[in-house]
Amino acid sequence: MIIDIHGHYTTAPKALETWRSRQIGAIGNPAQMPRASELRIGDDELRESIEGNQLRQMRERGLDITIFSPRASFMAHHIGDFQVSSTWAAICNELCYRVNRLFPDHFVPAAMLPQSPGVDPATCIAELVKCVEQYGSVAINLNPDPSGGHWTSPPLSDRHWYPIYEKMIEFDIPAMIHVSTSCNPAFHTLGAHYLNADTTAFMQCLTSELFKDFPALRFVIPHGGGAVPYHWGRFRGLAQEMKKPLLEDHLLNNIFFDTCVYHQAGIDLLTRVIPADNILFASEMIGAVRGIDPQTGHHYDDTKRYIEAASIDPKQRQAIYETNARRVYPRLDAALKAKGR
Amino acid sequence: MIIDIHGHYTTAPKALETWRSRQIGAIGNPAQMPRASELRIGDDELRESIEGNQLRQMRERGLDITIFSPRASFMAHHIGDFQVSSTWAAICNELCYRVNRLFPDHFVPAAMLPQSPGVDPATCIAELVKCVEQYGSVAINLNPDPSGGHWTSPPLSDRHWYPIYEKMIEFDIPAMIHVSTSCNPAFHTLGAHYLNADTTAFMQCLTSELFKDFPALRFVIPHGGGAVPYHWGRFRGLAQEMKKPLLEDHLLNNIFFDTCVYHQAGIDLLTRVIPADNILFASEMIGAVRGIDPQTGHHYDDTKRYIEAASIDPKQRQAIYETNARRVYPRLDAALKAKGR
């Protein structure tokens, strides 16, 4: 079985974006604010948006299951206040849940949170609980920078975030550390902000004792860990100067990297440097890079091809494709086992 | 000949830091402001600070020349106003010049600029001109984020920066794009901010037409290009979606990566993905990572060992060690040729 732990609902029906535009336009003008119930998307529309897109490509590539969360760049936590984010997160999470109900064998939901800059993350817990308990979400996406590129929140090691971590431990779910759109003109969202956030989050963990406070906390750092595996020697050396334990002991019981790295050389580096038990198969299809690589004739984001060609043994490949995901996402494993899978 | 294009004066005598502390302490209190002339460092102190440190290790490793600029983390352009930065840059640049005079066969200066957040970069030109004309500086370090981690400046493609570029073209010097200390608690200076800036700068160039306006402009992106080579497929794919030319044509006539990547797997990726003509040997010794790698028994930053072991041919190795540096830094080449080197 091949589990893609990183998929977003990037192909939602146009009505979603239209509703969101109305919501944004009504900020500061409550009389204009659309109600959530004004957004109507039928099951047929949902089916169509998935069948010809993600599901078609999953079948073509031989992927079985995608952990499916709302579109990352649309989270845009910097827009409006908590109430705006709260309504928007509820809508987006419900759509991913409905996709799961329509395609229960292929899509498993993960939740976005209604974060808002300067607002206590504890305010997100009600949505988190609903998604896990009612929607069967197996993970959350946690945005370390809800300001959208101004980085005004404390580091992930700060007690600011602990209410979220306590709930994650209680539910035994991991968090993917994933920013949203950059509203800072210095940072291109897909080419700079995402990768920078991955590197930043890793370093926030490295300099801290977070995982001493939460030995069971699990973070997935997407996009192959940003710059981290490429600079693994740098991070080992920095940890050494700070008298931290070896990275294997200090971080790798708690941090996992996905395989959203869109060329063979990158995946070869990842699998050479990072233990296979810390690598989770992912493509982020349909996501940031949708084209076909003229050098290979295949989609850049067809990451399974790179894993197939990597110099790893069958057991490691199996770990990356399935075993690790079942371990890092125990609620996914339980849901699969309940179906005899 | 082996040229290390990325060295900083990290071992300057303690009196420099003491003077800087006095300067910072006097911000807002002009009567307390120390004069530059109050800083007195003798030639013997300079010699000692270099001979037992950078020069000793250059000899041990077989490096001939280092392009030597003020300590990057000490530039701290976010502190004080333009006048504070201006006095500080003048002091630091003069010290690098004096090291060059004391060790003319081994150290060639590159200049820091007196940048200050929100101040027109054109104010830096007087210092730049002095360093090139009087000190023989062969390059500048340009900070894309003088705010120190708040990223309040326009992207490098903005006309805001053009006065600097025009002077670079006139003098035929490259700029290393190098940030300084992060004062944003989200970003660790050495483990996040530096690498993020490298990735950010590359993406600012990718999305723009900067090198159409300045076909002869040359940027050196340090620390192996941040996350860029590891995600080369992502950047190729993003450029393709934006209908940009192939990266080779769009950026690689103007952008060069150094080899400050502190493990074999990272250098192997760099040399596999990036054309050898775009790679410049560098170690940043004595810099961010000073320890000995227990996996190899050698210094993490002894990057020559990785280049020696990389799967490249002798001509490519020669390009990385010397030929490219002479091409990208024509004033270095001219200075060497004047000495028959």
Image (spheres, coloured by chain):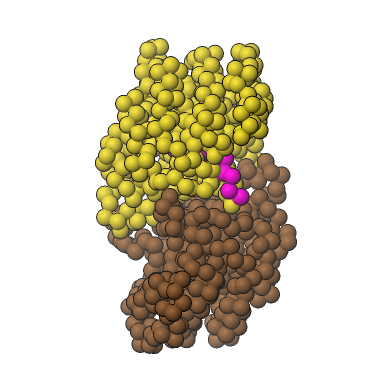
Chain colours: A yellow, B brown
Q: Residue at x 64, y 70 (%)?
A: B122
Q: Main secondary structure of the magenta part?
A: loop
Tell me which segment is drawn in magenta: A177-185
Q: Nearer the viewer, residue A60 or B241?
A: B241
Q: Position of residue A168 (x, y in %)?
A: 35, 29
Q: Nearer the viewer, residue B279 or A297?
A: B279
Find out whether residue A184 is within the magenta segment.
yes
Q: Residue at x 42, y 71 (%)?
A: B24
Q: Residue at x 61, y 50 (%)?
A: A185
- Relative to residue B82, is residue A116 depicted above or below? above
Q: Position of residue B65 (x, y in %)?
A: 47, 76
- Relative to residue A226, is residue B294 depicted above or below? below
Screen quadrant of the C terminus of chain B = bottom right
Say which quarter of the image contains residue B293. bottom left
Q: Position of residue A29 (x, y in %)?
A: 63, 32
Would you say A119 lies left or right of B300 here?
A: right
The answer to whether one can see residue B135 in this image is yes
Q: Position of residue A94 (x, y in %)?
A: 52, 20
Find out whether residue A233 is within the magenta segment.
no
Would you say B231 lies left or right of B304 here?
A: right
- Relative to residue A225, is residue B157 depicted above or below? below
Would you say B248 lies left or right of A66 here?
A: right
The answer to whether one can see residue A275 in this image is no
Q: Residue at x 38, y 69 (%)?
A: B286
Give the farthest residue toward the right: B213
